[in-house]
Amino acid sequence: TQTDDFESQWITQSRTERKRPLRGSGITGKNQIITIIDSGLDINNKYFGPTSNSVFDRWDYSQRKVVKYDHSMGDKTEPKGGHGTMCAGAAAGKVAGTDNNANGVAED
């Protein structure tokens, strides 16, 4: 699944192309945990991974992005092009070590 959604940051923050006032004022999601309820998540997508399978069993704060994955509904995998991965990417995805306009709103 690719989540190269270059529009989500500015659409959700201002609806003005390339204007990202939250990021511009230092609100990046650093040290915050969010919850996404959707179709699933590709935990090793370039915007989230690499992620250890430990997140399926316990909270693992040593992970880069995904620290817990509740798979009680049986969704440990995400179909190719999945909606859950796209939504999570728009919210919190970040390519490791990269300042990318397709990173999520709460990229840190």
Image (spheres, rainbow, N blue to C red):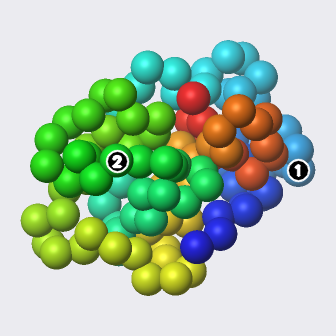
Q: Quadrant of residue 96 in the image?
A: top right
Q: CA distance from mark 1 to mark 2?
A: 36 Å
Q: Badge 1 local density, few (<14 within 10 Å), some, or many (20+)?
A: few
Q: Residue at x 53, y 43 (%)?
A: 92
Amino acid type of the residue that numbered disc 2 sits on in the rendered structure: Ser
Q: Is residue 11 visible?
A: no
**Quarter placement of the C terminus:** top right
Q: Residue at x 84, y 39 (%)?
A: 19
Q: Position of residue 43 (x, y in %)?
A: 42, 57
Q: Which residue is mark 1?
A: 17
Q: Position of residue 70 (x, y in %)?
A: 19, 56
Q: Which residue is mark 2?
A: 52
Q: Is residue 46 above or below residue 72?
A: above
Q: Is residue 51 visible?
A: yes
Q: Quadrant of residue 21 in the image?
A: top right
Q: Residue at x 32, y 39 (%)?
A: 67
- Viewed as shown, does residue 84 lie left or right of 22? left
Q: Earlier in the sequence, mark 1 or mark 2?
A: 1
Q: Residue at x 58, y 73 (%)?
A: 1
Q: Position of residue 82 (x, y in %)?
A: 49, 77
Number of numbered callouts drawn:
2
Nearer-the-camera pick, 26 or 95:
95
Q: Badge 2 local density, few (<14 within 10 Å), some, or many (20+)?
A: some
